[in-house]
Image (cartoon, rainbow, N blue to C red):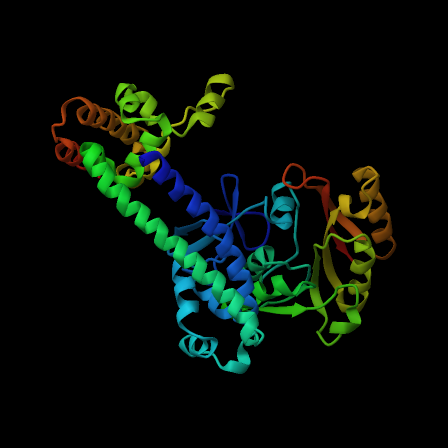
Amino acid sequence: MKPSKIFEVYQDRSSLYTKNLTPGKTFFGERTVKEDNIEYREWDPHRSKLAAAIIKGCANSFIRKGSVVLYLGAAHGYTPSFISDIVGNEGFIFALDNSPRVVRDLVFLAKERENIAPMLANANHPEEYADIPKVDIIYQDIAQRNQADIFLRNIERFLKPNGYALIAVKARSIDITQKPKKLFNDVRMLLDKKMKVIDFRILDPFERDHCFMVTKR
Amino acid sequence: MINHAINNVAEIDKVTNILVKRCREWYALHCPEAEHEFTDHAFFIGVILEKDKATLLKELKLKKEDSMGADLSEPDLKQVLLLAEEIQRLSILREKHLAYLDVLTKKYCPNMQELCGTAIAAKLIEMVGSLKRLALLPSSTIQLLGAEKALFRHLTRKAKSPKHGIIVNHPVVQNAKREDKGKSARALADKISLCARLDYFKGEFKAKEYKEELEKRFR
């Protein structure tokens, strides 16, 4: 088990691990490894786009101990649970999702992990949850047609001036008839107007027609 | 008889899984905390049939206001509980089938039953069709019964050869260390084939010795 180049993420051969914040408890049936009395949870790149981006060589996720993260499209909380490992008890995650069914699962996750706050809201309408503070990181993983637009609006409203924003783009839900590469470029151009794209990864073979971008103000 | 009974057990498993899934989602509208807490299906069904929401929440040390669930009206909840009852009845039927299979296998193939337990013995016989056919099979085939897909993947393409078929579920193979899985499966298949032959041709009872031998070897 060695630290990888990403903050608080560990690597053993080709698999990624994070230190388990709640030792002895797992939520998604993932494998755990114990080493020197520290429990690590295995992070599956097939289930998490952030893990896929890291495996594909993403240089830095900028999420670190103590970060405050706004997570748009948290779903059942697989990736948020690992981000919660990374930020630790000093950090915090606002995990947002639009579907009541999955937020129910998030609530159970948040009961065990004190640094996650589940929120049932639509990322399309940032004014609905305008009372959250400014955050260090915005992470977006929602498969929507206007996802770049949603991303930018949330950045404007919630990101600190020197913060970073991470986005996973699904080409297939933007336009099924166009080539993914072109769509990625379109999104990139759109983001480039307001942000600086510092990392761009295509997530093949973990996710088909997805890309991952790290941007900076 | 064995074939039908074991097949029905497998089918009941399949059906209850589908029904339990629905029942869980449905009941979770009422009390998601309980649905989340009791992960074992059979136990969950038993619990929701016995206790109502108020007692369940009390047991989980939650206040009534803290629950995320909605208060379902009597007729609404009744449908969910009817489904749960049906599922419970199916699982009772499954148990009865297994008890019946127990008697049957003890009578027709006592050696096999002793060595690998009712479920695996019955399943093996079902897969090849009859005890006679099983007795005539080489043990290498028995080892891989149920792993046909993997076997042909191995033969036609360059995949690894499978170590075991349905005998993975046997405690000897289950408890073997990772590097011993293949060895234990091979040894177990040997003994199963001997047992099948004893059962079919001679009728002596030797399975106990075989079982002890295997357990000694792979611990």
Which quarter of the picture shows residue B162? top left
- Can residue A175 be seen in the rendering of this structure? yes
- Can residue A36 be seen in the rendering of this structure? no
Q: Position of residue A155 (x, y in %)?
A: 78, 63
Q: Is residue B90 left or right of residue A3?
A: left
Q: Is residue B62 left or right of residue A139?
A: left
What residue appears at the point 27 percent right and 47 percent down from the top-left corner? B99
Badge count:
0
Placement of the C terminus of chain B among the 4 image quadrants: top left
Nearest to the observer: residue B40 or residue A67:
B40
Is residue B85 positioned above or below B118 on the image? below
Is residue B103 positioned above or below B17 on the image? above
Placement of the N terminus of chain B among the 4 image quadrants: top left
The residue at the far front in this view is B1
Nearest to the observer: residue A144 or residue B19:
B19
Q: Position of residue A137 (x, y in %)?
A: 69, 62
What residue appears at the point 56 percent right and 56 percent down from the top-left corner? A82
Q: Position of residue B5 (x, y in %)?
A: 35, 40
Q: Is residue A159 left or right of residue A76?
A: right
What residue appears at the point 68 percent right and 63 percent down from the top-left corner? A97
Q: Position of residue A129 (x, y in %)?
A: 73, 73
Which quarter of the picture shows residue A195? bottom right
Is residue A52 positioned above or below B79 on the image? above
Which quarter of the picture shows residue A69? bottom right
Nearest to the observer: residue B52 or residue A126:
B52
Q: Is residue B200 left or right of residue B95?
A: left
What residue appears at the point 45 percent right and 49 percent down from the top-left corner? A31
